[in-house]
Amino acid sequence: MVVFNEAARLYGALPSRHRLEVDAANQLHDLANGNHVPWGDTWDCAKDAALNLRRLYLDLSNELNARWPNAHLMPPAITADARDLVKLGYWALYSVLGPLINARQAVRGGYPPIQADTDFENDLMNILARVWASHAHLEGVTVVQLLSGANASMNAIVNEITLWGNVGQMLAPNISILGFVELLARVIAQQSNDLATLRTRLNATSTRGPPNLQYFHRATPQCLFVCAGQNNGGRTIVVTSTVDNWQGYGRVNDEMQNFRQTVRPTSAPVAGPAAFPVNVRSQGIRHEFDLVHNNANAPGTNADAIRLGVITAWQLVAANFTNHANEQCLPLRVPSFSVKPRCLRCQGLFRYNIAHNNQLQNEETAFRARKGQALNTMCFRNFGCAETIGHFYCAAAAAAANH
């Protein structure tokens, strides 16, 4: 199978090194004056992100070396995904994480680094080594040749890194707005023949971790959504994710959330009929779930039957939902890559084939049966779910007659 790609690559302008250095300086100034600032949250986020990205870029390097020893034979789509992931790595290192080394030195006030500082700097050096290795592999050169000053691709990156640090330069343009894990999964999926193979390969990555890690999985999404056309026998596979989590790193997290709500929903143009009105239908089905919410939560009632009844009635009207019944889907938690249920909205609005996976069926039944949980956490209304973006991608792939 091949991974469905956007008609045009998705790039945006993310915070530059200078912008984040200014933020850090302002936080440290307020901290020195006794004001409460979220500096600790920023530092905790950065430590966790560095650890997660260290694992992820090891996976990228290993994948390229093992599956594509000759980079010139790589299909253009996988090359583009890998290049975008490499550039994301440079941005994360030089704009997001790197400035915190100097900020930590200021916080310590002349005291020697503690173990957390040493671990953080080691993680960054490890990420940089893997990014260099992957970049060199894509260029068909050694790392020494990449860094010799004669490689045009590396020189272009150096120029961009310099731009990101210039005084007054608040944005880093032309950065992929796809997630780190999303891009890695797309690279891995290019040589996976079906959903089971893809999940097996994801479970073999260093990125994979137990669901009860003490960290909050910064720089990674909560969910990965994969879908195979023609009931897992088609030509394409769709890979999308929820937005990457940078909670605690205010400006970075805000920009990531902004891109998810504004750019991603229309990122896969659909040929033929007008695009499915996700926002309108989301409001509608949430209203239906709200009407039965108290009854579903009442003692002695069958919450699963009540909520399943809402979905069944909703799907009696063809315009209320999109029919992906010939497409097998598999929502996965990140970083465990274990099967996860879709929210109530996505179960109602996007009819995918889940009969192929008993665990997914059981998880969704158990989800509908939950009691005492706020409806907002069970029925999303915006584009937070990976399935919403996945729908647009699946529809575009189907319109191109290759899904």
Image: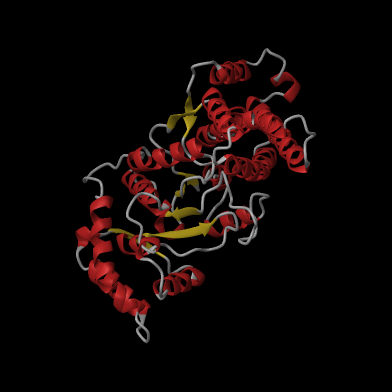
Q: Position of residue 131 (x, y in %)?
A: 66, 32
21 lies above or below 368:
above
Of 141 and 87, the residue lying toward us: 87
Of 197 and 29, the residue lying toward us: 29
Q: Position of residue 150 (x, y in %)?
A: 67, 12
Give the residue at x 33% y 51%: 382
Image quarter of residue 355:
bottom left
In the image, taking residue 352 as reference, residue 96 lies left or right, namely: right
Q: Position of residue 73 (x, y in %)?
A: 60, 32
Of 191 and 238, the residue lying toward us: 238
Give the residue at x 61% y 32%: 32
Give the residue at x 27% y 71%: 310
Q: Position of residue 172 (x, y in %)?
A: 49, 24
Of 227 and 235, the residue lying toward us: 227
Residue 4 shows in the view: yes
Q: Residue furthest right?
A: 112
Image quarter of residue 396:
top left
136 lies above or below 379:
above
Residue 239 shows in the view: no
In the image, taking residue 118 as reference, residue 179 lies left or right, namely: left
